Amino acid sequence: MDWQGQKLAEHLMQILLVSFALGAFVTGYIVGSFQLMLLIYAAGVVLTSLFTVPNWPWFNKHPLTWLEPVEAERHPKPEKPVAPVGKKKSTKQK
C-alpha cells in the first residue's frame, strides 16, 4: 500500500465508522433496542475492516520508485557525530 493509499484507507475508515455509528444510533433509538444498535455497529466495523484492511489494488495506484543499488551507493549516508570520550572538566574557579 502506498502513501496515498494509506491516506485513502484512513479517510474511508473514518467515514464508514461514523456513518455506521450514526445509523446504528438512530435505528436503535427509534426501535428502542440497545442490542440492535450494537449489532448494526458491529456489522459496520466488520464491513469497514473488509474494505480498509486488505491491500486492495485501488490502494496501490501511486507506487514508490526506489533507487537502484548502484545509484544508492553514489549517495552515502551521513555520518553520525561521535561523542568525545574522556573526563569531564570541572567548572570550579580557584
Image (cartoon, rainbow, N blue to C red):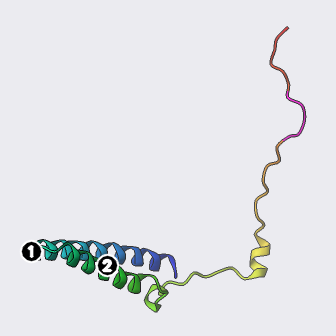
Residue extending furthest top? 94
Residue extending furthest right? 86
Query: Please, what is the three-letter code of the amino acid marked with disc 1?
Result: Ile
Residue wearing tag 2: 42
> Mark 2 or mark 1: which comes first in sequence?
1
Residue 77 is drawn in which quadrant?
bottom right
Question: Residue 73 has which mark?
Answer: none
Q: Residue at x 54, y 84 (%)?
A: 63
**61 and 29: which one is in front?**
29
**59 and 73: which one is in front?**
59
Within 10 Å of the Cα at label 2, are there few (<14), some (14-19), or many (20+) other Cα atoms?
some
Q: Quadrant of the C terminus?
A: top right
State left or right for residue 69 relative to residue 84. left
Q: Could you say whether the residue bearing mark 1 is in a helix, strand or loop?
A: helix
Query: Please, what is the three-letter code of the amino acid marked with disc 2?
Result: Ala
Residue 57: % across, % down: 47, 91
Residue 55: % across, % down: 49, 87
Give the alpha-carbon distance from disc 2 to disc 1, as whole Å.
18 Å
Q: Which residues are magenta?
A: 84-88
Residue 68: % across, % down: 72, 82
State left or right for residue 54 relative to residue 87. left
Residue 17 is drawn in which quadrant?
bottom left
Question: Residue 30 has which mark?
Answer: 1
Q: Residue at x 45, y 82 (%)?
A: 53
The vertical placement of 93 against 77, above or below, is above
